[in-house]
Image (cartoon, helix red, strand yellow):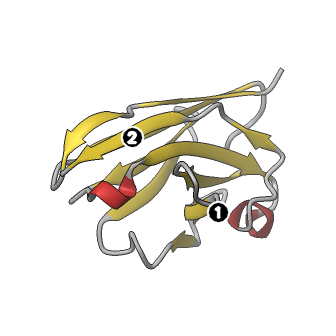
Amino acid sequence: QVKLVESGGGLVQAGGSLRLSCAVSGLLFSDRALGWFRQAPGKEREVVAAISDNSEVTYLADSVKDRFTISKDNTKRTGYLHMNSLKPEDTAVYYCTIDEVYTKVKVGGGRYWGQGTQVTVSS
């Protein structure tokens, strides 16, 4: 059974940092692309970041490009989203997703999704 479990969310003040983790089990992570999405109340789900299976290609949304970093450790079977200089508008539930195809992950078409972790940034 394939399972993705996010962790690392919480409550932080504006300007703070968090590292989200996505632990993958049930399949090889080394041949899967990873994506991070977020959704705030009343807003559409939006892509935050994506990375190819062996980290050859990465993508960051313009809103986070100078502040966030995506990475994956295939040996540990864990993906990460490093978030710095957090802003109140970053408040959302963050989801990780994986798929064999990087382009599918990037547009929200990944085959597998985690349950999400809440990130709240106070003013």
Q: Residue at x 64, y 52 (%)?
A: 34
Picture coordinates of residue 42, whole percent (x, y): 58, 54
Please, is residue 110 above or below residue 65 in the view?
A: above
Residue 38 is marked as none
Tell me where residue 58 appears, x and y as whole percent: 54, 70
Q: Quadrant of residue 112?
A: top right
Instruction: Look at label 2 and name its amino acid.
Output: Val
Quadrant (top left/top right/bottom left/bottom right) for the N terminus: top right
Q: Residue at x 76, y 70 (%)?
A: 103
Q: Nearer the viewer, mark 2 or mark 1?
A: 2
* Residue that numbered label 1 is attached to: 52
Q: Quickly name the residue at label 2.
A: 119
- 26 left or right of 52? right
Q: Residues within 10 Å of mark 1 (few under 14, many from 20)?
A: many
Which amino acid, by three-letter code, is at mark 1?
Answer: Ser
- Of 62 and 56, nearer the camera is 62
Q: Nearer the viewer, residue 99 or 84?
A: 84
Q: Nearer the viewer, residue 76 or 2?
A: 2
Instruction: Give the spatial CA distance, label 2 vs label 1.
Output: 24 Å
Q: Would residue 10 appear left or right of 3 to someone viewing this image?
A: left
Q: Residue at x 60, y 64 (%)?
A: 47
Q: Position of residue 123 (x, y in %)?
A: 18, 52
- Decide: few, some or many residues near mark 2? Use Cα within 10 Å; few <14, some 14-19, many ≥20: many
Label 1: which secondary element: loop
| 116 lies left or right of 9 | right
Does residue 88 appear anywhere in the picture?
yes
Residue at image location 52% in from the left, 51% down from the top: 40
